[in-house]
Image (cartoon, rainbow, N blue to C red):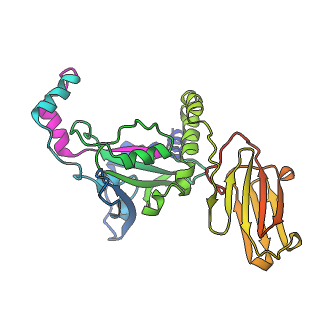
């Protein structure tokens, strides 16, 4: 039983055991666990902001965003006609008063957009939204939808009202869950987590829902982004069968001045005259003997031959 629970927790399933609920609370140390998260307003004219949350370290285990956002969605502005219509759509099983109490409570719903995997350090990214958003008639949050689409979700996904984005991480052999920073910079389409989210979501689905994964693989596919990605000290481009890495060097640098080592999962580049020193853990495996490098016109270009030619690379590094 303990192994099963550890296996589930390691794959992002949040589990609370009876003994966890019954544990007496220890006296607080006064120390606080601080983490950052992001608010995406439904109004496109309103600025996206970075927020900071604090919880006592003794209570930091688990995802605390629902606690942080408690009361944020507590709004009661759906009139009786709307509530009655919704009640009828549910076959009258839910009364108007019960619906109104639900809205006044301000329930927070979480929606995972990036799944935890061993490769990404067992980190997951969630959207947090008003669980009564549709009932309240809240507007579609297009910026949140665009974020979800970049993670592999369909464009017709319904995300309504203000949204909050946060990250959680499972650590240690017992997979202890806790909140870690998610910043404004993490919203960039170039952020590593965002570029690999589609692949991570499929990998997670493959381990938990193999049949659904098979059909989703065909839908999401492996569309290759052939655009050039600038990482500062180098650029890279996924060419399909190969990945091309380009490093700018002085025009007088020759091939004999460069040392390039290509391993199945690593690329090392050293150019003493240009003070270039790269050691990159690659996104996926390559075939060293079929990979090449050249020096010409102030560029050192490395062509990495993929082992899995049909797999698109979301990032050069893992």
- Name the outermost residue toward the right: 256
Horizontal relation, residue 121 to residue 255: left or right: left
Determine which quarter of the picture holds residue 7: top right
Where residue 248 sits: x, y (%)?
A: 72, 69
Let me know if residue 252 appears in the view: yes
Relative height, residue 252 to residue 158 (above, below): below
Asked whether 246 or 18 is in front, the reply is 246
The one of 36 and 311 positioned closer to us in this rendering: 311
Measuring from the top left, give residue 152's x and y in whole percent.
51, 41
Residue 165 percent location from the top left of the image: 39, 53
Quadrant into which the C terminus falls: bottom right
Does residue 76 appear to the left or right of 24 in the view shown? left
Magenta highlight on residue 279: no
Q: Is residue 33 above or below residue 22?
A: below
Magenta residues (range)? 90-113
Position of residue 52 in the picture relative to residue 150 (left or right): left
Residue at the farthest front position = 297
In front here: 121 or 75?
75
Q: Quadrant of residue 94?
A: top left
Expressed as whole percent of the image width and height from the top left, the position of residue 259 reads 84, 69
Q: Residue at x 57, y 54 (%)?
A: 121
Q: Image height check: is 308 above or below 218?
A: below
């Amino acid at each position: 039983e303990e192994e099963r629970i550890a296996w589930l927790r390691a794959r992002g399933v949040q589990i609370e055991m009876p003994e966890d609920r019954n544990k007496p609370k220890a006296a607080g140390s006064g120390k606080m666990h601080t983490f950052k998260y992001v608010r995406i307003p439904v109004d496109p004219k309103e600025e996206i902001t970075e927020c900071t949350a604090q919880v006592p370290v003794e209570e930091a285990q688990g995802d605390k965003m629902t606690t942080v956002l408690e009361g944020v969605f507590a709004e009661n502005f759906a009139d009786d006609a709307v509530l009655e219509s919704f009640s009828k759509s549910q076959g009258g099983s839910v009364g108007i008063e019960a619906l109104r109490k639900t809205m006044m409570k301000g329930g927070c719903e979480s929606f995972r957009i990036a799944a935890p995997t061993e490769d990404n350090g067992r980190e997951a990214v969630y959207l947090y939204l008003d669980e009564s958003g549709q009932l309240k008639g809240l507007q579609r949050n297009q910026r949140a939808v665009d974020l979800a689409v970049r993670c592999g979700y369909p464009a017709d996904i319904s995300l309504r009202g203000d949204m909050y984005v946060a990250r959680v991480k499972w650590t240690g052999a017992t997979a202890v869950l806790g909140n870690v920073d998610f910043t404004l910079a993490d919203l960039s389409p170039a952020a590593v987590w965002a570029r690999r989210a589609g692949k991570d979501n499929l990998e997670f689905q493959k381990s938990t829902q193999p049949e659904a994964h098979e059909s989703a693989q065909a839908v999401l596919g492996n569309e290759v982004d052939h655009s050039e990605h600038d990482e500062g000290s180098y650029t890279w481009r996924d060419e399909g069968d190969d990945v091309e890495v380009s490093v700018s060097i002085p025009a007088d640098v020759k091939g004999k001045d460069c040392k390039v080592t290509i391993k199945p999962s690593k690329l090392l580049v050293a150019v003493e005259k240009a003070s270039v020193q790269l050691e990159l853990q690659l996104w996926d495996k390559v075939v060293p003997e079929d990979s090449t490098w050249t020096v010409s016109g102030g560029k050192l270009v490395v062509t990495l031959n993929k082992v899995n030619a049909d797999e698109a690379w979301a990032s050069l590094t893992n």
